Amino acid sequence: MNIIKKKVLSVFENQVLKQGCVLEVRAWDPATFFEVDLHLPDVNMEKWTSVQHIKVKVSAYTYRDYTPALWDAETHTCTLCINSSHHGAGSAWVSSLKRGDTISYLGVGSTFHKPVADRKLLCLGDTSSIGHFLALKQLALGIGDVYGAISFSLESHAREFSDYFDTYLQPVQEKKWDLSLVSWLDQQDLSNEIVYIAGHIPTAIQLRRHLKQRDDFNGDIKLQGFWG
């Protein structure tokens, strides 16, 4: 990045960046997945009707989108669930976080995923989608039950997910060259569900294609890709 562009971006960041505080960081075993509790005093969470994303500064002029989950509108707190198994600026950033750190972010915006009344809400994704689906579950309270499957490459992380979170989301073990979520889908009876797919883009596209080929499925599919 040239000097002029850096100066322009610095001026822009100084004008628009907001700050939050890290309340707690919990690493799973092994430490390639993190829960980060944040206090975001400038965020109004009361009006959220869809799953949100927060654009966090993870290094100089570099941003990553994460999903605020398990939020409390009164205290302006939430939790980010971050998969750091892939090398990159976001993984390095979350691995270095500790309680009391200040985080910078550009803002919080809506995604197209939100609950629909009187429909079965089926979720399919990998570990990068955990926060996304926990947010959908919170929004769906009093509207409908969120269920489905999340694929895990590590058995220890699958156990921690089941132990920590009270959901109808079933952990599924990934196997080499096996699309575990497709196998899980083949065991389900489908009809008029709304299917929310999130995570690895090629896998998400394959899941959507597989669903459209099912003769018993006449519902809707909503896809949110996070990484390729």
Image: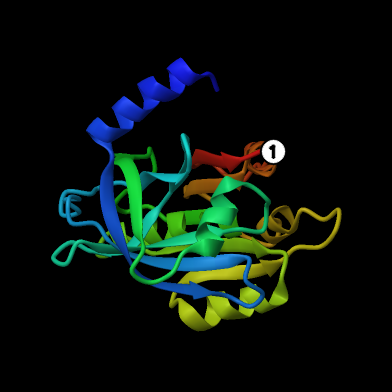
The one nearer the camera, 14 or 129, is 14
Where residue 93 appears, as percent x and y from the top left, is 52, 55
- At 48% from the left and 80% from the top, the residue drawn is 164
Where residue 180 appears, as percent x and y from the top left, is 74, 59
| Direction right: furthest residue | 177
The one nearer the camera, 20 or 48, is 20
Q: Is residue 224 above or below residue 83?
A: above
Give the color scheme: rainbow, by chain, secondary structure or one colour.
rainbow
- Can residue 114 be seen here? The reply is no
- Can residue 127 be seen here? The reply is yes
- At 66% from the left and 61% from the top, the residue drawn is 151
The one nearer the camera, 217 or 72, is 72
Compared across the picture, whether 198 is left or right of 211 comes to left
Q: Quadrant of residue 71?
A: bottom left
| Direction top: furthest residue | 4
- At 63% from the left and 66% from the top, the residue drawn is 32
- Secondary element at image label 1: helix
| Residue that numbered label 1 is attached to | 202
| Amino acid on which disc 1 is placed | Pro
Compared across the picture, whether 114 is left or right of 151 comes to left
Compared across the picture, whether 2 is left or right of 180 comes to left
Where residue 227 appears, as percent x and y from the top left, is 61, 41
